[in-house]
Image (cartoon, coloured by chain):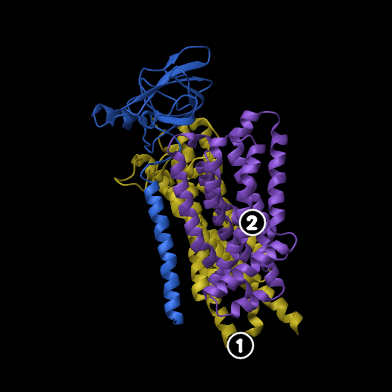
Chain colours: A yellow, B purple, C blue
Amino acid sequence: MAGMSELTASQRFQAFANPARFMALSDRLLPFCVVVTALLLAAGLYLSLFDSPADYQQGETVRIMYIHVPSAWLAMFGYMVMAGSSAVALVFRHPLADIAAKSAAPIGAAFTFLALVTGSLWGRPMWGTWWVWDARLTSMLILFFLYLGYMALWATIEEPVRAGRAAAVLALVGSINVPIIHYSVVWWNTLHQPASVFRIGGPAIATSMLMPLLIMALGFTLFFVTLLLLRMRTEILRRRVRVLRLARTGR
Amino acid sequence: MIRAFKTLVFRDTKLAIRVGGGAGMAVFFFLTVTAIVPLGIGPNLKLLGNIAPGMLWVALLLSALLTLDRLFQADFEDGSLDLLMTGAMPLELVAAAKALSHWLTTGLPLVVAAPLLGLLLNLDTAAFGPLVLAMLIGTPALSFLGAIGAALTVSVRRGGLLASLLVIPFYIPVLIFGVGAAGGGGVSAVPGAGGQSLLLLGAVALVSLVLGPVAAAAALRANLR
Amino acid sequence: MTRKQRRAGFIALGLGIIGIAIGLVLYAMRDNIVFFYSPTEVVEKGIGPGTRFRLGGLVEKGSVEHTGAATIKFVVTDLMKSVTVSYTGIVPDLFREGQGVVAEGAIGPDGIFVADSVLAKHDEKYMPPEVAKALKKSGRWEEGQMNQDEGKGTAQ
């Protein structure tokens, strides 16, 4: 949007039309998102920490799963949102897609970090080690590096249009990693156990534990959406300020 | 088209050899990094021999990373990259030619130097063949994947460090399968495991031959238009 | 050659190269890519003494014996072949008879796998103890998952 000076007035109007509509829509959506996220997370935390049974093998330690698994899902979901928006931004030059990709990155990185840390805390008592270089853990760490690289690229290139397009190329190239993470436990015989929920033959997890997990996952997802909307609004406002400043100095 | 491609490869290769800070520096860096490893580990020849394939690969990776900024930076600064972009040759092919000449002037000399450095690290003589073979297959991937990072950061002044950060995640598979094929990395000393790693390394290299130029061209367009 | 033809040629070349790469991966995948080897693979591949590798499988029921202060000896099996393992050190919580383990080390001259680290592998099944008990009572318990009541504690 920094190339504004070359655009005609009508093009400028168009570029702003969609973000403006987004601002109005998200303004109405946000309070609803916040309330539902809070309710879901409260219910999910109560169910998973107090109401759900201990595991027949792992005992109480299994409760780490209710944080670890949704975090890992959101880490990958975040990257897919980022890569998907990047593709839309590159192909259709839609300004909102650009903003969505940029806003999703730090949230996804945070969830990846959370998944790595909770996994490490879980691995120590169960496996007997904090960390092991098997395919699932390594590919998850690579995902974290990709997020960091993406954010670093945005931070380094000053001009938003240029930065957005370069970062979009990086996000798309890095998306190879997402299927590798998902299938790592199938292709390699890893220390990490295979998927429990999305597997052939249905979930291998008792209903009394699956329900809290799904509620937590839903809560985490809405938390992600809420944060994404907030960050996108902030980003749009930041760009408006930037354009206004540029306009003032140009005068 | 093919002639233009050849001309560009020759031009870049000549430039890299004649201009200081080119091919020779990477090999020199490779040598110095390898020389400090035994000093850091202390007197344990057996341990040194065990980790030699891994250490050589890591040193090779670092040397390749250091030279990435040479790929597009100079041409970007003196404006010849703009000329190449407006020329008849597709930008993907330009990127491929530059990555190829980068491999000729960096990857290949490093592979040639590797067995010599293997001696310094007490590498088992039986491991020299697999190591060189793995490096021959793996180093083009380093150049072609590196082109993506170099293209992404072409407009950034002093973008070398950022390019390294962006590229390292993509280098990890090359490192894992490369070390596996070279007979290091503990587990893969098992019979048959090296061949499997070599196949996968070949697959990574082939994918990078296509992915590298396409993504690098897209990144150059993003940066220059 | 027109521009369009040239472009189609490049795309075909690119797809061809990717195709070969996929072929290589599929060919390499005939064998599982391994973090650890099962006892059957150890026998089939003829992994000899002195080669370091990771051994994975189930701890055979009733095979754990304490041979020293902190040294234990147990049999790792994949229900077809088995390998005897000796290990000195502390085992993780989940180390139980009938449970999965991954041991890292090398086979000694006497044919016993000497491990210098033992990690517990758990499966993707999660259930409350009552459900596990009921499953076992009704006989719908899968092979290789056979401990729980008796397995707890005996491994330590």
Quadrant of res B140: bottom right
Q: Is residue A171 left or right of residue C46?
A: right
| Residue A184 or residue B83, whichever sits in front | B83
Asked which secondary structure carries label 1, the reply is: helix
**Mark 1 on the same chain as mark 2:** no
- Give the number of the mark in front: 1 or 2: 2
Q: Is residue B184 visible to the viewer in this orientation of the structure?
A: no
Q: Nearer the viewer, residue B69 or A60?
A: B69
Image height of A71 relative to C16, above or below = above
In percent of width and height, residue C40 lies at: 35, 30
Q: Amino acid at mark 2?
A: Thr
| Label ID, residue A9 | 1
Name the residue: 57% across, 53% down. Answer: B139
What residue lies at 49% left-to-right and 63% top-to-bottom?
B210
Q: Residue furthest left?
A: C138
**Residue C112, horizontal then vertical, whole percent:** 44, 19
Question: Residue A118, how many percent across, how many down?
Answer: 53, 41
Chain name for mark 1? A
Q: Residue at x 58, y 65 (%)?
A: A167
In this view of the protein, which residue sits in the foreground, C20 or A244? C20
Identify whether A5 is placed above or below A217: below
- CB contact under 8 Å: marks 1 and 2: no
Q: Which mark is residue B106?
A: 2
